[in-house]
Image: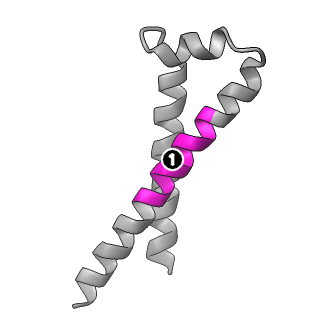
Amino acid sequence: MIEMACHAAMGVALGLGFSFALAQIDSSAIASLIAHSANPTTTTIIIVSYFTLAFAVGASLTGFVFTMMQER
């Protein structure tokens, strides 16, 4: 379980870094979407949360597969 928690934490860190970078880079259409939305703070929170959750779930599942393969 500790290895799974480590993989989930790594996924959260990667997801946060990726989503914050994506929201701040002006060449991406997401920065324009956030700037022109009715409530930019809420839009930013939703986008960052979505990408963070996606990375965390992906890293957790990958960690689970690696752990099961290692135990074989």
| 37 vs 10: above or below | above
Q: Quadrant of residue 61?
A: bottom left
Q: Specify whether 38 is left or right of 28.
A: right
- Residue at 33%, 79% (x, y): give it: 67
> Picture coordinates of residue 34 (x, y %)?
63, 17
Q: State the extent of the magenta-drawn residues as a range.
A: 47-58
User: Mark 1: few, some, or many residues within 10 Å (few <14, many ≥20)?
Assistant: some
Q: Is residue 54 magenta?
A: yes
**Residue, x 51% and y 47% (percent of image)?**
13
SS assignment for the magenta stretch, majority: helix
Q: In what quadrant of the picture does the C terminus appear?
A: bottom left
Kind of residue at disc 1: Ala
* Residue 69 lies in the magenta-colored region: no
Question: x%, y% of residue 44?
Answer: 66, 27
| Mark 1, residue position | 13
Quadrant hosting residue 36: top right
* Residue under the image location 37 percent in, 69 percent down: 63
